[in-house]
Image (cartoon, rainbow, N blue to C red):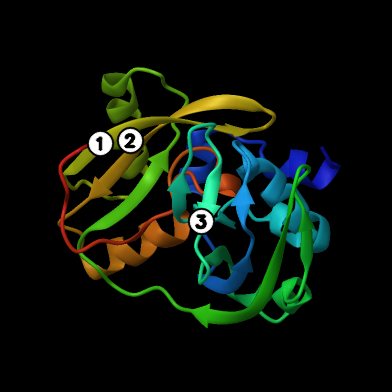
């Protein structure tokens, strides 16, 4: 692990929640890969941080989960028109051009990034993250930590936790739960998208996107 990546993962939840996030945006790249191995997320982040080391210095930056179909061994089959979205400070958008056309070494396979497009946050009263890691294995304790972290952001709105998953970052496995927060005012919605929640933003944990409705937990 590089020194920059180690810096990226220091600090507790309170420090992350209380920090005023810079203006954040998503840059979305075309992604070409046939199949990604189980636990690829940390290798993917390290490969991107190797090309754009400044991403490791932003505690609010990270890589959104890649969409695809899971196979029996835990790998991910990537769709032909798949995208890779990287959340980053807006003032780094031009610097992100170094990622266009990059071939990322993920150990057993490679992935190629295409052209990137800039995507600003948009207001939505309900935000969703497919995985949020708060350092708790128990769902009740997880929800208590979520409520506290939202409170530190000045957000006291209802939320619904859902599917329990494991994700690897910092070179070990962590428990995460899906989470939807709803009833947000515009300023709260944009703040939560920019700040995120919990640990593991590097691998997509705690990164929120607009969600039209709250679905039943899986």
Query: Distance between the Cα atoms at labels 2 and 1?
Result: 10 Å
- Which residue is found at the position 53% from the left and 46% from the top? 76
Task: Estimate the x, y position of residue 118 in percent, counting from the top left.
Answer: 54, 81
The numbered mark, 2 or 1, whose residue comes first in the sequence reads: 2
Residue 141, given in percent of the width and then of the height, sits at 32, 20
Q: Position of residue 36 (x, y in %)?
A: 62, 48
Q: Residue at x 32, y 43 (%)?
A: 150
Residue at x 20% of width, y 40% of height: 160
| 11 and 105: which is toward the camera | 105
Residue 172, image x, y percentages: 64, 25
Classify mark 3: helix, strand or loop.
Answer: loop
Indicate whether 214 appears above or below 101: above
Badge 2 vs badge 1, beta-carbon distance below 8 Å = yes
Q: Residues within 10 Å of mark 3 (few under 14, many from 20)?
A: many
For marks 1 and 3, give the CA distance: 18 Å
Q: Which residue is mark 1?
A: 161
Label 3 or label 2, whichever lies nearer to me, is 3
Kindly check if marks 1 and 3 are in contact, taking CB atoms under 8 A apart as contact.
no
Q: CA distance from mark 3 to mark 2?
A: 19 Å
Horizontally, residue 178 falls left or right of residue 56, namely left
Give the number of the mark in front: 2 or 1.
1
Instruction: Using the rendered view, name the quadrant where residue 163 is placed.
Output: top left
Determine the secondary structure under disc 1: strand
Residue 162 lies in quadrant: top left
Residues under numbered marks 3 and 2 in contact, where contact means CB atoms less than 8 Å apart = no
N-term-proximal mark, 3 vs 2: 3
> Label 3, on which residue?
64
Task: Identify the residue position indicated by label 2 in the image.
Answer: 146
């Amino acid at each position: 692990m590089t020194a920059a990546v180690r810096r990226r993962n220091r600090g507790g939840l309170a420090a992350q929640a209380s920090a005023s996030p810079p203006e954040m945006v998503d840059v979305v790249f075309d992604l070409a890969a046939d199949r990604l191995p189980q636990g690829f997320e940390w290798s993917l982040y390290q490969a991107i941080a190797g090309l754009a080391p400044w991403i490791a210095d932003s505690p609010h930056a990270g890589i959104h989960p890649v969409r695809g179909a899971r196979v029996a061994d835990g790998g991910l089959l990537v769709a032909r028109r798949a995208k890779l979205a990287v959340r980053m400070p807006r003032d780094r958008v031009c610097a992100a051009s170094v990622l266009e056309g990059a071939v990322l070494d993920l150990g057993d396979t490679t992935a190629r990034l295409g052209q990137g497009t800039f995507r600003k946050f948009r207001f939505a009263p309900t935000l969703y993250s497919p995985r949020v890691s708060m350092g708790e294995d128990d769902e009740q304790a997880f929800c208590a930590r979520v409520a506290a972290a939202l409170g530190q952001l000045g957000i006291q709105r209802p939320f619904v936790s859902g599917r329990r998953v494991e994700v690897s970052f910092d070179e070990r496995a962590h428990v995460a739960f899906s989470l939807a927060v709803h009833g947000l005012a515009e300023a709260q919605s944009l703040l939560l998208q920019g700040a995120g929640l919990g640990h593991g933003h590097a691998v997509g944990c705690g990164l929120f996107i607009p969600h039209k409705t709250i679905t039943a937990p899986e």
